[in-house]
Image (cartoon, helix red, strand yellow):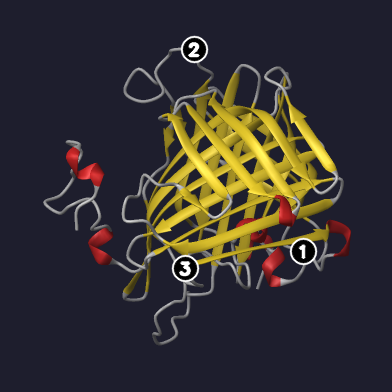
Amino acid sequence: MLTPFDDYPIHQTSLPLARAGDAHPDFYDRFWFNGYRDDCFFALAMGLYPNRGVIDAAFSVVAEDVQRSVFASGRAPIDRTQTAVGPIRVEIVEPMRVNRLVIDAPEHDLEADLVYRARTPVFEEPRQIRWNGPRLQFDVTRATQLGSWEGTIRSGSTTIEIGADDAVRGTKDRSWGVRPVGDPAPMAPVASAGQLFFLWAPINFDDVAFHYMVFEDGAGVPWSEVGAVIPVIAAGEPVTGPAAEVARFSGIRHDIRWASGLRRSDGATLTFDRGHGDESIELEPLLTFRMSGVGYIHPRFTHGRWHDELVVDGEAFAAGDLDNAEFRNLHVQQVMRATWGDRTGLGVLEQLAIGPHAPSGFS
C-alpha cells in the first residue's frame, strides 16, 4: 500500500510507509498539546492507529471550574499527513517549531484557533519498553518540547484571548510506537497487568525549561526515567541535532504529597543532583485537568476504538461535582506553580497511579 509520502526519501525499512509497527494492532502515532496559565488549561490529543484503521482526536478546556470536551473518531486516512478528523485539525506549519490547532464545534460549545511556537529544542525521552507476560505492552518513543501559545478559545460563554505577550506556556508531546489502545485482544491474566505508576513533569521557567519522567513498578523501582534541563532558544536556533544541547541526568527523587483518600497530589518536591549538590523544585497545584477529557481511560472515547466512519460528541461537567476517586478521574495533569531556587515558573505534573505502589502506600 503506497501513499504520497513514499515519494520522499525517508523510508526506515524495506516496507512502504503505510506498513507500521510490524502490523502490531496497538501501534499508534499521536500528537499531544497542552497550554496553561494559573486560571485555565487546554489540551488536544490526536492519534492515528494504522493497523486498526482508526483516527481519533479530542480537545478539552478547563475554565471557570468547568471542563468541556469535544471528541471525534473515524476511519483513518491512508495518507497520514491528513491530520484532521471531524471538527478537529492539527496543522504542521513548520516542523518541530510551529503548529496550528483548529477546533470548530459550536454545537458542543467549543471553538478554538491556536498557534503553538517552540521555546526549546525537542527532547527525546528514553525508549520505553515493557512486557506484560508474553505480550509487548509498551515500546514507545516520545519527543517532548516546551512552547508558548497565542490565539482564541471559546468554551461555553467564556472566551479566552491569548496574545503573543501573554506568556501562556505549554508542551508539545509527539509519541509513537506500541502501547495499549482500543479493545485489547483476550489473554490469560498476568499478575502485574493492572499496575502502572507514571509521573511526567515539563516545567517552563523564563530562562530555561525542566523536564522529568518516570515509570515505576509496584515496588517503586523505575523501569524508565529521565531528567533534563532544556535551554530556551532564540529565533532560528536549532531544535534538533547535536547543536540543540540538552543536559540529561538521572536519579531524581520525587516526594508526592498525596491528597487524603486520593491518588492525586496536594503538592510535590523533585530533588536531584546535577553534579554540584542537591537541588529541589517545589510544585504547588493550581488546578486539575482530567485526562479523560481527551480520551485517556474515557469510558466511551478511549483511544483507538472503532466507532463508525465518523462520530463526534461532547461533554461538560463542573469540576466540583466529580467523584475524584472514580477510575476515569484517576489520570490527571495538575497545573503547578514551580519554585527552583530563585526561579519561579509554571508547568504540569501528570499523575497516573493504578494498582499497587509501595512507596506511596497504594495497594
Mark 3 element type: loop
Mark 1 element type: loop
| Pointers 2 and 1 in contact (C-beta within 8 Å) | no
Between tags 3 and 1, which lies in front?
3
Q: Closer to the N terminus: mark 3 or mark 1?
A: 1
Q: Closer to the N terminus: mark 2 or mark 1?
A: 2
Instruction: List the residue tagged with mark 1.
Output: 262
Residue 166 in view here: yes
Instruction: List the residue tagged with mark 3.
Output: 309
Residue that extends furthest to the bottom in the rendered view of this protein: 188
Left or right for 35, reference 131: right
Residue 219 in view here: no
Left or right for 292, reference 310: right
Q: Closer to the N terminus: mark 3 or mark 2?
A: 2
Q: Residue 235 — which label?
A: 2
Q: Residue at x 68, y 33 (%)?
A: 281
Residue 347 in picture, x, y percent from top left = 67, 35
Between tags 3 and 2, which lies in front?
3
Q: Residue at x 24, y 44 (%)?
A: 4
How much space separates mark 3 and mark 1, taking CA atoms?
A: 38 Å
Foreground residue, 354 or 279?
354
Other residues around mark 2 within 10 Å, as few (<14) / some (14–19) / many (≥20) = few
Foreground residue, 315 or 268?
315
Q: Residue at x 79, y 65 (%)?
A: 324
Note whether 237 is above or below 267 in the view shown. Answer: above
How much space separates mark 2 and mark 1, taking CA atoms?
A: 43 Å
Q: Amino acid at mark 2?
A: Ala
How much space separates mark 3 and mark 2, taking CA atoms?
A: 42 Å
